[in-house]
Amino acid sequence: MQLVRPALQHLPSFVSALERGWSPDNVRGAQAAAEALDRIRDDPALYVDLQDDRDARGPPIVLPGGATVARLPGYRRWMWDGEFCGEIGFRWQPGTTDLPPHCLGHIGYSVVPWKRGRGYATQALRDFLPEIRLEGLSFVEITTDPANAASRRVIESNGGVLVERFIKGPEYGDSEGLRFRIPLT
């Protein structure tokens, strides 16, 4: 498995994953997948271009519950093993490690269900961290649900240290979360 920059040549495999039921958004699920498919149908080149959005040019972010918020600068890489396997993304506010309250962490990742259990998320995070270091942050935060043992292993195997248990905001159901920090310096 390798990380690739989203590109038109990889888009058909990404679309296939969306059509098979995978979603890059583990909270909004099928709704987020349908929105991505609509944007791809409207302008595939723009969709791919906005996967590397360091200037936050893309559309606002729709939170669970339907509220919209301004997009943060960010970029994504696709996991690729001859076909689309998942994605990993990074978002940040330039000049600070702080994130707005609605943004649970700097990094998010998702592996398609039919490729899970192969170590792809662990490898993707390991391979992505050197690129993220170039943004100048001293650390990144990643959150997961307490019951998500697989995600916790991914984070911990990449140097993540649990810094707190917290309650997510109402847009995330006021549920419990775990916040990990990975030092970058």
Image (spheres, rainbow, N blue to C red):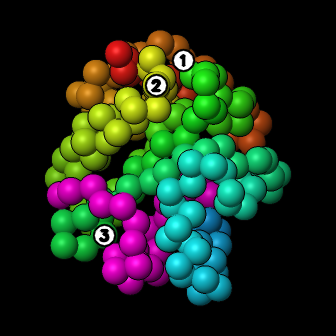
Is residue 154 one of those drawn in magenta?
no
Outermost residue, right side: 67
Q: Position of residue 150 (x, y in %)?
A: 31, 39
Reading the image, the residue beneath label 3 is: 84
Residue located 25% across and 73% down the image: 83
Q: Position of residue 135 (x, y in %)?
A: 46, 32
Reading the image, the residue beneath label 1 is: 165
Q: Nearer the viewer, residue 16 or 8?
A: 8
Task: Name which residue type carries label 3.
Answer: Phe
Disc 3 versus disc 2: nearer the observer: 2
**Spatial distance from mark 2 to mark 1, Cα to Cα?**
26 Å
> Which badge, 2 or 1, is on the more N-terminal residue?
2
Task: Name which residue type carries label 2.
Answer: Gly
CB atoms of marks 2 and 1 within 8 Å: no
Is residue 21 one of those drawn in magenta?
yes
Q: Residues in magenta?
A: 1-30
Reading the image, the residue beneath label 2 is: 136
Judging from the image, what secondary structure is the residue with disc 2 in? Answer: loop
CB atoms of marks 1 and 3 within 8 Å: no
Q: Is residue 20 above or below residue 168?
A: below
Q: Position of residue 174 (x, y in %)?
A: 70, 32
**Spatial distance from mark 3 to mark 2, Cα to Cα?**
29 Å
Q: Position of residue 89 (x, y in %)?
A: 46, 48
